[in-house]
Image: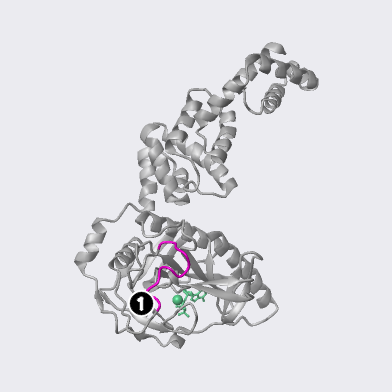
Amino acid sequence: MKVMIGLEIHCQLSTKTKLFCSDSIENAEPNKNVCPVCLGFPGSKPKINKKALDYGIMVALALNCKINKSMFFSRKSYFYPDMAKNYQITQYEIPLAVDGFLETEDGKIRIRRIHLEEDPAKLLHVGGDITSAKYVLVDYNRAGVPLLEIVTEPDFTSPKQVREFLEKLSSILEHLGVYDSSREASLRVDANISLEGGERIEIKNISGFADVEKALNYEIVRQKGLLRMNVKIERETRHYDAERRITKSLRKKEYEEDYGYIFDPDLPEIEITEDWIKQIKANMPELPHDRVKRFVSMYGLNEYQAKVIVYTDKYLADFFEECCKSYKKPTEAAKWIITYLLKSLNWHGISIRQSKIKPKDFVEFLELIDKKVITERYAKELIKDYVDTGVSPRKIVESKLTKIDDSQLEKIIEDVIKENSKAVEEYRTGKTKALEFLIGVVLSKTNKQADPKKIREMLLKKI
Ligand code: ADP
Ligand code: MG
């Protein structure tokens, strides 16, 4: 059954101030970053933040869009407590940019439009979610934060492709420096999905790429079930309940025409000149796909390694390059980052940016392996302790290697030989694997505080 998915993505731009006033967008106590403009007081007048336009133009260029030479803002009217003015300032008739694309492994995704708008206030649903809360608190700090809305054509054919696209897109936004991925819900996705024979369903406001994928997978199963039973699927807006991993109906879909868009007379028409675009082009940072290519040619990584390091998160790519300044075997560094460091970080559910890992310590760690101070096998354990504690691997090794002296170790080895006579016998009859087993037992008895190489030597002498 053919699946069609299209996205509307809202990205909070990391400007210093809001889109139409000079309030900060930094985190603060609720309702601190507010003023007459973003609270919609009578007589207040919005003023456009040029930085937000610069950022919008950068993203439009990175997504291969055509930028409109002249554009304006409109009022989208609706009544809801998240919008004190009862209208949102957005772009409707003529957006900032149109007709772009972004490549995925499974083909091109066309970008229909990119426009700027203000974020509404944040609603805090207390005692439940949007469908069940007892009451709602409103935080207007978020009202007026610049959002860039990116709308795709319905070109996606699977939830997995959606996830890849979102990872690529967020990497582009990070490389451009226009958004901060560590901010809560800085990228929010509305996903539209239809199956052949049914109307489309919109799932609103999902944050987190894994949740977007899960919500879409859930919808495919749900809609297939309905179609199989000949139930008509009508247009509808749904909400994703991340805890129960299901979608729930919010309302029958309203149409854009219902919002009664009008031109906002408080804001001027904005002309985007060739010079302006040229200037931004000249100062564009390196984009992730160029960085992948450079990692292959400059550091000799294979394409897979380069992609993992660049697309996992810009901070990781920066970390890798920082390591390579003093460590001259980039492919070794890449191997340890991808296979062991990332695994450990994932296990803890943190990004490298949230961790205490530092390039200098990591390079020392790689050098410990190169100089055979530690075995690879021990290194795999050590990296876990490193991620756990943030203590530099060199320090961990130094403290552990000195904690057990030879006579203590000898005693432990003798005990292990006594207690594991079967394995000793096996080793003597030629099963070399039994030795590894014995080393492992000794190692764990020493709480990994002895050097595996030394254990091996001493064991061999005794059996
Ligand atoms: P609206 O104006 O009602 O929001 P649009 O036509 O502008 O609707 O489309 C909004 C989003 O829905 C876009 O991201 C688009 O790609 C997606 N979309 C449109 N048609 C379909 C469809 N049949 N199946 C899935 N997604 C769709
Ligand atoms: Mg929209």
As rendered, which of 48 and 31 lies closer to the eye? 31
The outermost residue toward the left is 275
Position of residue 289 relative to residue 423, above or below, is below
Residue 451 visible in the picture: no
| Residue corresponding to mark 1 | 37
Where is residue 330 shown, x and y percent of the image?
42, 35
Where is residue 110 shown, x and y percent of the image?
41, 67
**Quadrant in the picture for residue 221:** bottom right
| Segment colored magenta | 26-39
**Quadrant in the picture for residue 37:** bottom left
**Quadrant in the picture for residue 57:** bottom left
Where is residue 97 shown, x and y percent of the image?
33, 71
Q: Residues within 10 Å of mark 1 (few under 14, many from 20)?
A: many
Position of residue 355 relative to residue 395, above or below, is below
The outermost residue toward the top is 461
Q: Main secondary structure of the magenta part?
A: loop
Q: Quadrant of the N terminus?
A: bottom right
Position of residue 304 relative to residue 139, above or below, is above
- Tell whether 284 sits left or right of 13: left
As rendered, which of 351 and 312 lies closer to the eye? 351
The image quadrant where one finds ligand 2 is: bottom left
Q: Quadrant of the C terminus?
A: top right
Position of residue 215 relative to residue 316, above or below, is below
Residue type pointed to by label 1:
Val
Where is residue 409 shown, x and y percent of the image?
67, 18
266 inside magenta stretch:
no
- Tell whether 176 sits left or right of 159: left
